[in-house]
Image (spheres, helix red, strand yellow):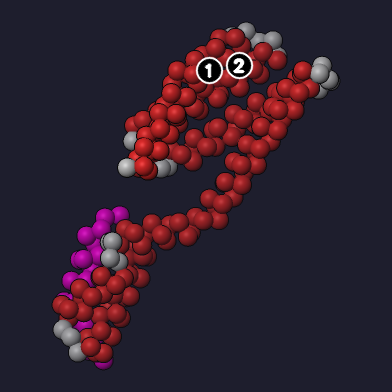
């Protein structure tokens, strides 16, 4: 089998380094992979280094080394992301269930309505905070309208929830918080939400 020279290995390494922010461990692994691929191609197909070099990059990383790093990051953090989503959806379900049950208790004047509602709104704040924290990681991939909508939804949900909790505890500023939350919800979040849904439906039709 033909072995690569140090100069040829340096050429491959320079090509890998064209993709910025590549993890050093992944960089070394890619270098080994490219070298083995090129040596085998040169030996099996009787082609020169340049042809095998181009063939290797087209076969292994057609969209650049950054794509490999993103896939590696996803695999390494998959379990963590899965656990985070379980927590978010679990607490979100608890929030919806408790608020729904609390409202029913309130309508029928059953005992425990205030405690149930308070717990539900507290769980809702936790859910919204976790969702915003998770969304911030991917904000740069979206347009400004989406970012405003996410932030408005978070602010509206927190203000309405905290205002309701203040109301249950008879704390001051409860009405102000709830009113501000409803205004953000009705005049910022909902218009953006339905307008973006409309744009998406039009884009699918065209």
Q: Nearer the viewer, residue 145 or 34?
A: 145
Residue 185 shown in magenta = no
Residue drawn at the location 21% of the way across and 66% of the way down = 15
- Whether tag 2 and tag 1 are in contact, CB under 8 A, the answer is yes
Count neighbours of disc 1 (C-alpha within 10 A) and say few if under 14, some if 14 to 19, many if 20 or more.
Answer: many
Marks 2 and 1 sit apart, C-alpha to C-alpha, by 8 Å
Residue drawn at the location 40% of the way across and 32% of the way down = 198
Numbered label tally: 2
The percent coordinates of residue 142 (x first, y second) are 36, 39
Residue designated by label 2: 163
Q: In terms of image quadrants, where is residue 125?
A: top right
**Number of the label disc, if any, that sits on residue 181:** 1
Residue drawn at the location 52% of the way across and 37% of the way down = 131
Range of residues picked out in magenta? 1-22
Secondary element at image label 2: helix
**Between tags 2 and 1, which lies in front?**
1
């Amino acid at each position: 089998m033909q072995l690569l020279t140090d100069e040829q290995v340096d050429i491959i390494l320079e090509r890998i380094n064209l993709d910025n922010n590549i993890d050093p461990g992944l960089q070394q692994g890619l270098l080994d992979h490219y070298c083995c691929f090129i040596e085998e191609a040169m030996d099996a197909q009787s082609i020169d280094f340049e042809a095998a070099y181009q063939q290797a990059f087209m076969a292994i990383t057609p969209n650049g080394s950054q794509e490999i790093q993103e896939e590696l990051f996803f695999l390494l953090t998959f379990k963590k992301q899965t656990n985070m989503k379980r927590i978010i959806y679990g607490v979100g379900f608890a929030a919806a269930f408790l608020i729904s049950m609390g409202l029913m208790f309130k309508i029928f004047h059953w005992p425990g309505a205030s405690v149930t509602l308070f717990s539900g709104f507290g769980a809702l704040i936790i859910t919204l905070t976790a969702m915003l924290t998770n969304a911030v990681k991917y904000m740069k991939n979206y347009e400004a309208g989406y970012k405003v909508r996410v932030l408005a939804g978070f602010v509206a949900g927190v203000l309405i929830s905290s205002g309701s909790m203040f109301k249950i505890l008879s704390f001051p500023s409860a009405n102000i918080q709830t009113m501000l939350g409803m205004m953000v919800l009705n005049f910022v979040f909902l218009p953006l939400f339905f307008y973006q849904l409309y744009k998406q439906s039009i884009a699918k039709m065209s």
